Image (spheres, rainbow, N blue to C red):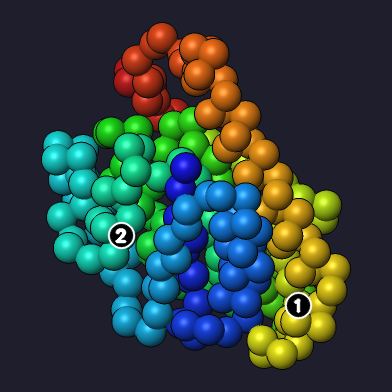
Amino acid sequence: MKVVLINGSPNAEGCTYTALREVEQILNDEGIETQLFQVGKKPVSGCIACRSCFKTGHCFMDDSVKEVAALFPEHADGLILGSPVYYATMSGQISSFADRLFFSSMKERRFDYKVAAGIVSCRRGGAVGAFDDLNKYFLMNNMYVVGSQYWNMVHGSKPEEVKQDLEGLQTMRRLGKNMAFLLRAFQAAKQLEVKEAVLEEEHIFTNFIQGS
């Protein structure tokens, strides 16, 4: 079993990283392999709506988005998106990253029946809004969203302050435990040949403009 963690902060080892590492350590302790990707300070291009991925199954841009997408569904079982809070929402880096990651994966349905969680770090306020934004990606891609004992957030303006947020760090650890439990439950279900909740229908896409 493997979980991919995405640090959507430009700071490689800042507050978001500190929270992600807390989750990652628990996953590792539970025997689950992890891989942490740093979005970093390099610009991440947003989706240009060319829809070439609808034909090829992947984004034409050759960057870390393509690298992460290639891990699903065969090589990874879970995904965690982490972001700092910018104006009560997620960072521009993780927004662009996630837009392209999920949109380019629609044709192949890479994220169906995978487990997922979003985590956010903030100095003071706006965390719930950012947390909600991250969860929306999971909830429309047939993913199982993992919760914790509180909303998945930590507080602090630098890593040293995050480490003083004892409840926040405990929430991260509980998230790791919950995700490990769910991954093992799915693994056991496969061994028992329990079928996934697949809807045997072609995906219907509509809009609200009706022809005359």
Question: What percent of the width, then of the height, locates residue 151?
Answer: 77, 57
Between 46 and 24, which is closer to the camera in this rendering? 24
List x then y, in percent, for residue 42: 32, 82
Element marked by disc 2: helix
First along the sequence among labels 1 and 2: 2
Q: Is residue 14 visible?
A: yes
- Residue neighbourhood size for the residue with mark 2, other residues' Cα within 10 Å, grouped as few (<14), some (14–19), many (≥20): many
Q: Could you tell me the amino acid type at mark 2?
A: Val
Tell me: residue 78, above or below residue 40.
above
Note whether 212 is above or below 171 in the view shown: above
Mark 1 Cα within 10 Å, few/some/many (few <14, many 20+)? many
Q: Quick check: 129 above or below 121?
A: above
**Disc 2: which residue:** 65
Instruction: Tell me how far mark 1 sits from mark 2, CA to CA.
Output: 28 Å
From the viewer's side, name the closer residue of 55 and 182. 182
Q: Quadrant of residue 170?
A: bottom right
- Residue at image location 66% in from the left, 86% down from the top: 159
What percent of the width, then of the height, locates residue 4?
45, 55
Residue type, numbered disc 1:
His
- The quarter of the image holding the C terminus is top left
Where residue 7 appears, as percent x and y from the top left, is 49, 70
Q: Residue 78: which numbered mark, if any?
A: none
* Disc on res. 155: 1
Depth check, front residue: 179 or 140: 179
Q: Is residue 190 left or right of residue 200?
A: right
In the image, is residue 106 above or below residue 70?
Answer: above
